[in-house]
Image (tube, grey):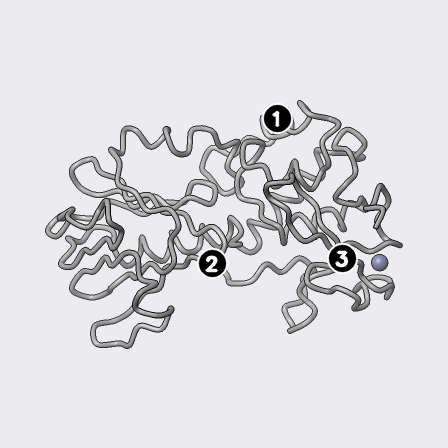
């Protein structure tokens, strides 16, 4: 699943390619939007809100998309071959004279009045990469459920927006707690929130989610994706399990030596 920094970078690239120019091509390949005509409208801006992408169009319309597990937007020059997936996976095409943006496998694609964006993103907590980031408010929301496992609490976009499963694993590692540790038992939770902000900021302008400071292949994460391979800090084999609410189970990685706290019983 794309992390908030990936969505932020996608928004930046789409904005650079599309903003301030009229659309000469616009196709929304989902049944409920198939007849919508957007050609001729100027793209005002493309912005990220948490993990949601907002393409704001002239006339007070917003094209809202969410990448969920494997959606993506790609940009192509005229005549360049599209390579983001099979033709039937294309959900949206937005193009001007110079660039064409193609959205693949978008599970959420809807058009709404810009004035009503809060209906789809109003539930989100403070946005780690947004202009109004508020660490204290995020901390308040997290602290509101002290019994909740920290991994699950960090994934909940109502607490703070932008963290996905890669950062959950790495944040828990860096703060020395397992993902199942109740939030109220995490030492210095303000440092956890500050670290989340720092990691996303550090990675927002580049692909990948480097948490170790080492961009070499196989060295970018302390524990994430390293099942049974050595923890990059202590060499102990990294354990793998599951965390998160029943309806949204996610893979958990942790080092049994570097991280304290509850772990699954099997
Ligand atoms: Zn370790």
Tell me the residue at 20%/50% (across/down): 20
Q: Earlier in the sequence, mark 1 or mark 2?
A: 2
The x and y percentages for residue 27 are: 20, 56
CB contact under 8 Å: marks 3 and 1? no
The residue indicated by pointer 1 is 141
The x and y percentages for residue 196 are: 63, 44
Q: Would residue 115 appear left or right of 144 to someone viewing this image? A: left
Residue farthest left in this picture = 40
CB contact under 8 Å: marks 2 and 3? no
Tell me the residue at 29%/46% (across/down): 55
The numbered dot on residue 70 is 2
Disc 3 versus disc 1: nearer the observer: 3
Q: Would residue 161 appear left or right of 75 to someone viewing this image? A: right
Rendered position, 83 above or below 186: below
**Which secondary structure lies at badge 1?**
helix
Rendered position, 121 above or below 88: above
């Amino acid at each position: 699943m794309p992390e908030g920094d990936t969505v932020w970078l996608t928004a930046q690239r789409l904005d650079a390619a599309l903003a301030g120019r009229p659309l000469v091509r616009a196709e929304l390949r989902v049944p409920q939007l198939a007849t919508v005509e957007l050609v001729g409208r100027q793209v005002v801006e493309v912005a990220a809100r948490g993990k949601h992408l907002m393409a704001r169009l002239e006339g007070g319309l917003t094209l809202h998309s969410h990448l969920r597990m494997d959606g993506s937007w790609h940009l192509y020059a005229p005549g360049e071959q599209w390579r983001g997936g099979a033709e039937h996976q294309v959900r949206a095409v937005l193009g001007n004279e110079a660039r064409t943006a193609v959205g693949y496998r978008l599970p959420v694609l809807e058009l709404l009045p810009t004035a009503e964006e809060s209906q789809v993103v109003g539930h989100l907590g403070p946005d780690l990469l947004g202009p109004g980031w508020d660490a204290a408010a995020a901390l308040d929301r997290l602290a509101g459920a002290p019994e909740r496992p920290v991994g699950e609490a960090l994934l909940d976009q109502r607490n703070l927006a932008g963290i996905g499963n890669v950062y959950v694993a790495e944040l828990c590692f860096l703060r020395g707690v397992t993902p199942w540790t109740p939030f109220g038992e995490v030492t210095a939770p303000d440092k956890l929130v500050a670290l989340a902000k720092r990691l996303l900021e550090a990675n927002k302008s580049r692909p990948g989610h480097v948490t170790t400071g080492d961009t070499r292949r196989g060295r970018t994460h302390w524990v994430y994706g390293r099942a049974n391979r050595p923890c990059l800090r202590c060499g102990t084999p990294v354990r793998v399990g599951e965390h998160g609410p029943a309806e949204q189970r996610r893979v958990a990685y942790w080092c049994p030596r570097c991280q304290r706290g509850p772990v699954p019983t099997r």
